[in-house]
Image (cartoon, rainbow, N blue to C red):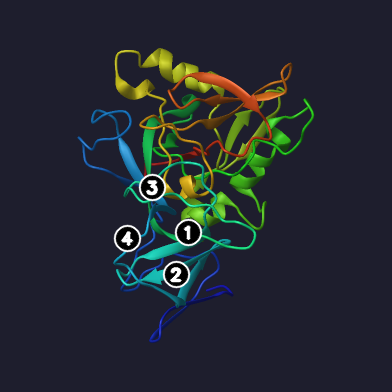
């Protein structure tokens, strides 16, 4: 094993470095793809295929769960604390704009002189299988069911010369950025990362980049709509996790929240998004109150 330390119980000490599959008498991290049973419901209805893969903070902690901060685990750049329910929780200072979490409790705001702290349960990430033959490669394309994160601008460049190849959100998804945040290393153990394939994707500047985690493009979203007009597969309305709400994503009553695509519009200096009602719109690059809906490809032929 590699050099890193984790404290779980007084009788268990694990040495990890972003992790192999982590097994103890608490939570088990999801290193491999688990296809959910036929008929599982989701944003595309019960006729779609869904899967679990990876893990991320999502639901706000229930009041009856007690957190022991002396027992923690580190995955990538994320530190999680053990709860009395034997699950892990992320600790976060709230800075949300929405009215309430999924359990009806209010979303708070942290001021410079007073922090409003909440804990969010680490849970398996649920994905929708968009295709089992992405661009003819026989790879399975997984697309997150929820808006998993927020407070990440498409780019912190205020000029109109932005491109996905160099933008902030791409760095956040794949490398260390923003006070050590990185989705790939935080959502997937080291073993899980080995299962994710590098995918060649086109940028608006006619370039090609190769990433493990990426955002869908405006063209890909349009293809989903055009090929699934008679089913719910084209449904683009996404709802944020409680964790994303605490990080400041905007949400409108019973509607969803806006989330970034990887496509940009040079003339206006804006990036394309899917709005709270599923419509395609453009927003300024540096906005931070929109969401992250990651995608990835994986080879399931030999699973």
Instruction: Decide: is 76 above or below 147.
Output: below
Which image quadrant is residue 24 in?
bottom left
Task: Name the secondary structure under disc 4.
Answer: loop
Q: Earlier in the sequence, mark 4 or mark 1?
A: 4
Using the numbered discs, state the Cα–Cα distance from disc 2 to disc 4 in whole angstroms.
14 Å
What is the x, y in percent for residue 112? 64, 59
Using the numbered discs, state the Cα–Cα distance from disc 2 to disc 3 in whole angstroms.
21 Å
Using the numbered discs, state the Cα–Cα distance from disc 4 to disc 1 in whole angstroms.
30 Å
Can you tell which of label 2 and label 4 is closer to the viewer?
4
Residue linked to disc 3:
101
- Mark 4: few, some, or many residues within 10 Å (few <14, many ≥20)? few
Task: Name the secondary structure under disc 3.
Answer: loop
Residue linked to disc 4:
62
Can you tell which of label 4 and label 1 is closer to the viewer?
4
Marks 1 and 3 close (CB-CB < 8 Å): no
Q: Earlier in the sequence, mark 2 or mark 3?
A: 2
Q: Residue at x 60, y 52 (%)?
A: 182
What is the x, y in percent for residue 133? 42, 28
Q: Earlier in the sequence, mark 2 or mark 1?
A: 2
Q: Residue at x 45, y 49 (%)?
A: 107
Instruction: Decide: is 259 above or below 191.
Output: above
What is the x, y in percent for residue 121? 39, 58
The answer to whether residue 269 is left or right of residue 253 is right
**Number of the label disc, if any, that sits on residue 81:** 2
Can you tell which of label 2 and label 3 is closer to the viewer?
3
Residue linked to disc 1:
191
**Nearer the observer, 52 or 196:** 52
Using the numbered discs, state the Cα–Cα distance from disc 2 to disc 1 in whole angstroms.
21 Å
């Amino acid at each position: 094993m590699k050099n890193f330390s984790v404290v779980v119980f007084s009788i268990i000490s694990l040495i990890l470095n972003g992790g192999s599959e982590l097994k103890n008498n608490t939570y088990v991290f999801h290193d491999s793809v688990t296809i959910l049973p036929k008929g599982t419901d989701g944003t595309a209805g019960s006729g779609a295929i869904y899967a679990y893969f990876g893990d991320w903070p999502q639901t706000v902690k229930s009041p009856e769960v007690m957190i022991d901060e002396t027992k923690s685990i580190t995955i990538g750049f994320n530190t999680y604390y053990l709860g009395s329910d034997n699950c892990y929780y992320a600790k976060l200072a709230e800075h949300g704009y929405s009215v309430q979490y999924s359990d009806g409790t209010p979303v708070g705001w942290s001021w410079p002189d007073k922090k409003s702290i909440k804990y969010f349960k680490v849970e398996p990430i649920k994905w929708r299988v968009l295709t089992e033959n992405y661009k003819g490669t026989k790879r399975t394309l997984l697309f997150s069911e929820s808006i998993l994160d927020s407070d990440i601008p498409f780019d912190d460049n205020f000029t109109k010369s932005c491109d996905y190849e160099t933008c902030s959100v791409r760095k956040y998804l794949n490398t260390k950025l923003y006070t050590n945040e990185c989705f790939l290393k935080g959502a997937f153990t080291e073993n899980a990362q080995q299962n994710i394939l590098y995918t060649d994707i086109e940028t608006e500047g006619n370039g090609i980049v190769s990433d493990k985690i990426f955002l869908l493009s405006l063209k890909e979203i349009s293809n989903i709509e055009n090929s699934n007009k008679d089913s719910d597969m084209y449904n683009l309305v996404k709802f944020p996790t409680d964790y994303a709400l605490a990080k400041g994503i905007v949400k409108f009553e019973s509607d969803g929240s806006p989330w970034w695509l990887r496509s940009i519009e040079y003339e206006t200096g804006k990036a394309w998004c899917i709005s709270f009602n599923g419509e395609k719109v453009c927003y300024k690059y540096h906005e931070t109150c929109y969401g992250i809906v990651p995608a990835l490809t994986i080879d399931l032929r030999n699973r």
